[in-house]
Image (cartoon, rainbow, N blue to C red):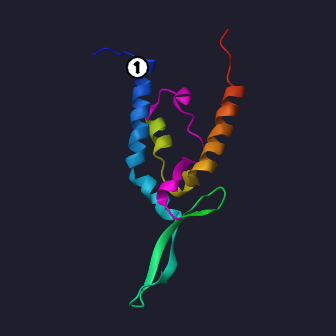
Amino acid sequence: MDDEVLTKEDVSFLFNELRKASVLWDGRKEVLRLARKKTFVRRAKNGNPVYKYMWQCAACSKWFRNEKDLEVDHIVEIGGITAFTGDWNETIRKMLPRPVGKHLQCLCAICHSKKTGVFMNAREKFQRKEK
């Protein structure tokens, strides 16, 4: 078997597949579970209490009624494909970290886009230009 190096396209494909898999990963569900609380809504006609879950954004601390309004975010950015060092074990550990409460957080869409924007601007600003 040849010791051929993966092409940029191969690495990009594998990285994107890992990102897709992280959406189905049970750690994501665990982070959402950690960010929720059960709240009393009202009493039913029979007198029993009715509860619903609400989820809290880690950045702005607002509460959301729908889990789909929140996104799971890496507290420390993983850097994307450009930060790939060639070590797939390291990449998998970054993308699917344990313990999740220490490495991941729930953010609302607005806070997540702000955080990602700041990271992308900083990365562009300090990226070396090719000669």
Q: Position of residue 43 (x, y in %)?
A: 46, 85
Residue 87 within the segment the image draws in magenta = yes
Position of residue 50 relative to residue 11, above or below, is: below
Vertical arrangement, residue 5 with respect to residue 82, above or below = above
Residue 122 appears at what percent x and percent y? 70, 33
Q: Which residues are magenta?
A: 65-88
Q: Is residue 130 magenta?
A: no
Identify which residue, 69 or 123, lies in the foreground: 69
Q: Is residue 75 visible?
A: no
Count residues near mark 1 (Cα–Cα under 10 Å), then give few for <14, some for 14-19, many for 20+. Answer: few
Q: Residue at x 55, y 48 (%)?
A: 73
Q: Secondary structure at mark 1?
A: loop
- 8 relative position to 111: left or right: left
Residue closest to the eye, 107 or 4: 107
- For the point 57% across and 34% down, which residue is it? 79
**Residue matched to label 1:** 6
Furthest residue in direction front, as rendered: 45
Q: Position of residue 66 (x, y in %)?
A: 49, 61
Report the amino acid beneath label 1: Leu
At 42% from the left edge and 44% from the top edge, which residue is drawn?
A: 22
Residue 26 seen from this side: yes
